[in-house]
Amino acid sequence: MAPLYLIQITTSIMNMTAKNAQNRVVGFDLGIASPIGWVDAVMQDFDGFLQDHASCEKKASGMALSMLAHYPDKPDIVAAMGDLAVEELSHFREVLHLLGARNISPAADVKDPYINALNQQVRRAPEFFLLDRLLVAAIVEKRGHERFNILMHTLPEGPDKHFYEAIVASEERHYQLFLHLANTYFDSETLNSRLSELLVLEAEIIRALPIRAALH
Ligand SMILES: [Fe+2]
Ligand SMILES: [Fe+2]
């Protein structure tokens, strides 16, 4: 039998996915909030956090290009991922500017344990692969939105805070974009069922990961 907290998360997630009149899944909540100590760790090593954030934006741009390359026959995906790759790369450039203003070099890319763990949940069979990739991407953007929002409210008034206000708005759009694409290619029952499973798994991953001065 699943642990009680997972049953609670599953039940609440099933209540949290929202559908509109066309029976499209138009929103969802994460299974658990980020741990309280996360933003404290970030504020204690904000320079290190910025280095990690730069890497995340670069990888997000690469992920969008990889989706585009994998589905050249799907015009919605090609158009959306082309735009997204450019936007994520512009975020990367903006974080580079924040680093440059501090005289800090970008760090070498390292494996992201959160992304790796989520990607392991992507089923490779052709009938599942696109659905899982879109939903994992939506969840990653949603978690990014949650964390950047916490950070934005914690930072003192100034350019860093203003930058993160813009990032929060972007991540909201990105999460909606991946959800929109999932609705384009899959019916709401299929989508909702897999989304609920992935949200439970994501909550487990968040619980298991150490807190550090990084986006994940
Ligand atoms: Fe971004
Ligand atoms: Fe994003």
Image: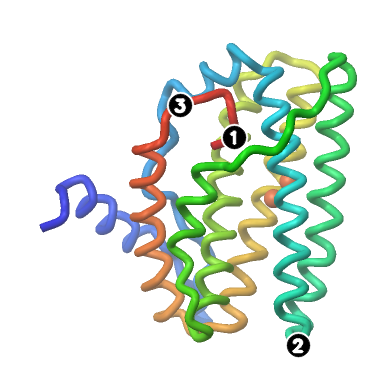
Residue farthest to the left, as pictured: 1
Residue type, label 3: Ile
Q: Nearer the viewer, residue 15 or 92?
A: 92
Q: Where is residue 93 drawn, in percent x and y?
A: 87, 38
Residue under circle 3?
211
Tell me if the residue at label 2 has its CB under 8 Å from ligand 2.
Answer: no
Quadrant the N terminus occupies: bottom left
Tell me if the residue at label 1 has its CB under 8 Å from ligand 1.
Answer: no
Q: CA distance from mark 3 to mark 2?
A: 41 Å
Element on which disc 1 rests? loop
Residue 110 sits in quarter: top right
Quadrant the C terminus occupies: top right
Q: Contact (CB < 8 A) between labels 3 and 1?
A: no
Q: CA distance from mark 3 to mark 1?
A: 10 Å
Q: Which sits earlier in the primary sequence, circle 3 or circle 2?
A: 2
For residue 73, the mark is 2
Residue type, label 2: Asp
Position of 73 relative to 64 (above/below): below
Q: Residue at x 86, y 35 (%)?
A: 94
Position of 147 relative to 136 (above/below): above
Q: Which sits earlier in the primary sequence, circle 1 or circle 2?
A: 2
Element on which disc 2 rests? loop
Residue under circle 1?
215
Residue type, label 1: Leu
Q: Where is residue 76 drawn, in percent x and y?
A: 75, 79
